[in-house]
Image (cartoon, rainbow, N blue to C red):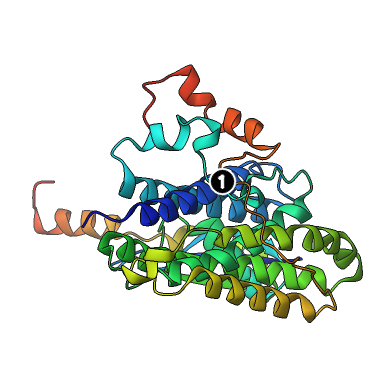
Amino acid sequence: MMPHAEGRDLVLSFADDELCVGQNHAWWIAIGPFLEEDLALTSIAQDELGHARSLYTLLSDDVDQLAYGRKEAEYRSAHIAELLCHDWSWALVRHVLHDIAEQIRWSALVGSSWEDLSHLAERALGEEQFHLQHGSSLLSRLLADERGQQRLTPAILELAPLGREYFVSSDKHLIENGIVTMPLAAQEQLWIDQTTGLFKQYDINIDFGSEAPSAGRSGIRSHDFAALHEEMTAVLRIDPQAQW
Amino acid sequence: MKTYEVFLKREGKDPFTHAGSFDAPDEEMALIYARETYGRRGEGEQMWVVPRTAVLSANEKELAMADRDHKHNDGLRVAELRRISTGEES
């Protein structure tokens, strides 16, 4: 079936989020806090980049052009996904917020009338379970420690409200057409509830703000995007015919 | 952090073999890191993760003492004597 333009927008936004987070996770290769964590986070990075590729494939035969060759205003990534986390505690918090959102987003695509998308969602959910287990296991251990909590709390308070942008998308026809099985607003509420519940255990109360940020979805790139894009297109600029 | 040893078993009749070691804070994280460190490319169908403290180490001196000629009998001498006694060509 030829999906409605809204469906294509939803998939493009999701793919761009995955591309940016995958690239950002990959940045920790060889400089993670300890070897095992370095390997785990960058292995997850590969999965996220794989999700991005699969989603782009639903939209175009030229995945590289779509992933790397668009003008800045044509990307749809949420700003939280673009953020360069210079401190590992921020990278860990973004990883957990992202994966809680991802699990909800994939779940809402299982059973989609867009069959290829539904199959992809089923497969991705299996991996997502590992990502979430990794992120939340490590985060909860660090939050149980006073010093860990001191380092992580500012990142949680700052990043969590930005995560609402993951669910910004027009869904007027998506429900009607059966592209998604849960309205975006309900997905967002589920994400807020799960996130609130996770951090409440550690007396961290998040102010999610009255309105979800939406600049990234409307085509405005955050400050960090240029550096991220520069890095992810480095190989392609050296060798436009590169295969990988 | 505690050190763990990883054993992997590939599909089929191969036995479990030692894949390596790594550090993790506890058992739950150990299983996560074992998978990402030694099994992320599908290297095994089954995996054992063992705390190093659970591994019993044999005494190295006693192991070295065990290396004696008469433990290496591969049957060649018997086969040679047999050939001589039956007059077979070698």
Does the rendering let one see residue B45? no
Q: Nearer the viewer, residue B65 or B14?
A: B14
Q: Chain of mark 1?
A: A
| Amino acid type for the residue under numbered disc 1 | Ser
Give the residue drawn at x 63%, y 47%: A215
Q: Is residue A71 above or below residue B89?
A: above
Q: Quadrant of residue B46?
A: bottom left
Q: Secondary structure at mark 1?
A: loop
Measured as percent of width and height from the top left, residue A91 is found at 71, 53
Q: Position of residue A1 (x, y in %)?
A: 21, 57
For residue A230, say whether it is visible.
Answer: yes
Q: Quadrant of the C terminus of chain A?
A: top left
| For residue A99, side relative to residue A9 (left or right) | right
Up-down: is A24 above or below A183? above
- Specify whether A141 is left or right of B70: right
Q: Specify whether A64 is left or right of A2.
A: right
Classify residue A69 as left or right of residue A198.
Answer: left
